[in-house]
Image (cartoon, rainbow, N blue to C red):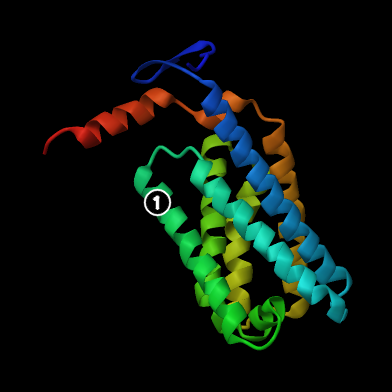
Amino acid sequence: MEITSEVYQGQFGEFSITKSDRISVIIYRSALAIAALCFSVGALLVLLQPNNPEIVNWLTWLYIGFSVGLGVALWTIHIYMELLHRVLQSFWVVGAIAAVGVALYFPEPFAIAIYDHPIALFGVGFSFAALTGIFFKETFCFNRFETKFLVPLLPVLILGHLVNILPIAIERGLLGAWAVLFLIFAFRKATQEIPSDIGDKSVFAYLKSQKQQPV
């Protein structure tokens, strides 16, 4: 039997936050922290040692850590719109499958293949679209300054590299900004009050009841 905490007044009635609710938020934030750390370490390696061939294998493992962290975050995030939630999860699945395909198809290490063959971003980019969705949700719900920059930054960098219109210096600057802002975002999430990430559970209950009603 779960022990409930304080009773909250929601838009459609009262609700309580349970231990499992809190655990899901902790998992969500921990997964985001892993994704942010893996991505930022990888970006730092690329920016500081761009010509070091020994880092390419590290980049592959760091991307795996980033992708797994992002996937767990997408499965534990609280989003009122179920359709949007499923779309973001689907984006991650497509991106993860595409990443495996790139790793198997191209002879180069994963990071080199992505950089030298921008066409691969048509598939792998879905993972970054899912991440952008998280940043958009956080901007909408919490008005975070870092996500306000990350929401446009990701598509500009990904699409700019895809169509080869960004100078190398601009790409490096955007990548560095992404890494720093992602870490700031993950750190601030860790210090945020847990109930705020759970949201209004009465809204979830209302939407579920509406879905179950016969048409």
The residue depicted at 66 percent of the width and 58 percent of the height is 66
- State whether residue 115 is above or below residue 186: below
Percent coordinates x, y for residue 177 in the rendering: 75, 59
Q: Secondary structure at mark 1?
A: helix
The residue depicted at 64 percent of the width and 69 percent of the height is 157
User: Is residue 146 visible from the viewing direction of this image?
Assistant: yes
- State whether residue 17 is above or below residue 139: above
Percent coordinates x, y for residue 39 in the rendering: 72, 59
Quarter of the rendering containing residue 10: top left
Is 49 positioned to the left or the right of 148 in the image? Answer: right
Determine which residue is flagged by label 1.
86
User: Is residue 182 visible from the viewing direction of this image?
Assistant: no
Q: What residue type is disc 1 on?
A: Arg
- Residue lying at the far bottom in this picture: please name it: 107
The residue depicted at 30 percent of the width and 27 percent of the height is 206
Is 78 positioned to the left or the right of 174 in the image? Answer: left
